[in-house]
Amino acid sequence: MSEGTEAKRKAVRKFNSKCKSVAIRYTPKELSEFERFERYISENKVNKAEYIKNLIKADLDKRGY
């Protein structure tokens, strides 16, 4: 293994250790909402994570947080 590859892996691990993530799950009763979300993302060429982050930010801003 080259030193460059190992250094890159180490840098990625360090960066990832600073990140936070959230997962969501749609239940069978909510699948129509998931499909609407998928359709919007696809039709508008939007990044899912960016879209969700923007929605959360807008809601928190509106609530004064």
Image (cartoon, rainbow, N blue to C red):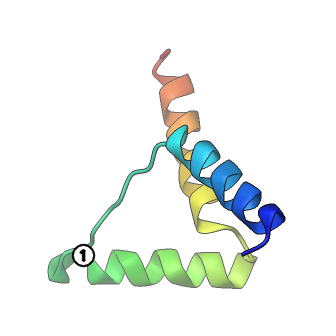
Image height of 9 relative to 42, above or below: above
> Is 12 left or right of 55, judged from the image as shown?
right
Q: Is residue 43 visible?
A: yes
Name which residue lies at 51% across and 43% down: 17
Q: Is residue 50 left or right of residue 26?
A: right
Q: Residue at x 70, y 62 (%)?
A: 6
Label 1 environment density (alpha carbons within 10 Å; few <14, some 14–19, many ≥20)? few
Disc 1 marks which residue?
30
Can residue 54 be seen here? no
Element type where label 1 sits in the image:
helix
Task: Residue 59: give x, y in percent of width and height.
Answer: 49, 35
Residue 31 in which image quadrant: bottom left
Residue 12 place in picture, x, y as percent: 66, 54
The residue depicted at 33 percent of the width and 83 percent of the height is: 32
Front position in the image: 40 or 23: 23
Q: Amino acid at mark 1?
A: Glu
Residue 1 sits in quarter: bottom right
Q: Which of the 4 image quadrants contains residue 5?
A: bottom right
